[in-house]
Image: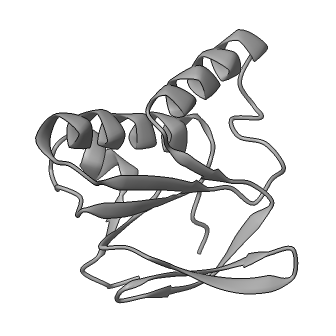
Amino acid sequence: MNKQNVVLASDILTGKVQAGKNTVVCGGGMIGGETATHLAMTKRLDFNNRQVTVIEIKSDIAVDEEYTRRIELYKLLDELKINLMTDTKVVEIQDDGVVVEVNGELEKLSCETIVLAIWLFT
């Protein structure tokens, strides 16, 4: 993956890179959730009309976390108005967004930054 609009969650969390106006986080585990909340809180302080969306292939987010941590994460995601798309598969990463599959239908999500918060295997 060698696109300028694609960054790692660790680079966002450490401040190595800044995200654009609209951001899609690929991966709804705890790292994806924490990255999304970090982005939303930063954007809420710095800019208006910013949007963060989390895409998760499973039917729920942070499924490997204990129940209380998941509930806390859900509350924060809701409070920060982060869009959650579960049961959603990333099909293609483009220069201006992400193509996802939801319920067998393809949909394009336009964004400036795509954050990878998933395990990548080669």
42 shown above or below 98: above
Q: Is residue 80 left or right of residue 57?
A: left
Residue 72 horizontal side relative to residue 109, left or right = right
Does 75 sit left or right of 10 as displayed? right
Q: Residue at coordinates 30% horizontally, 54% vertically from top-left?
A: 50
User: Residue 1: x percent and y percent?
Assistant: 41, 82
Left or right relative to 37: residue 31: right
User: Which residue is at a point 74% across and 54% down the rendered structure image?
Assistant: 86
**Residue occupying the point 23% across, 43% down:** 43
Who is closer to the viewer here, 79 or 37? 79
Question: Residue 106's image quarter?
Answer: bottom right
Query: Can residue 118 be seen from the camera position used here?
Result: no
Q: Residue at x 27, y 48 (%)?
A: 12
Work out whether residue 119 or residue 92 is closer to the camera in this orientation and state it.
Answer: 92
The figure's colour scheme reads one colour
Q: Quadrant of the C terminus?
A: bottom right
Mark yes or no: residue 112 visible: yes
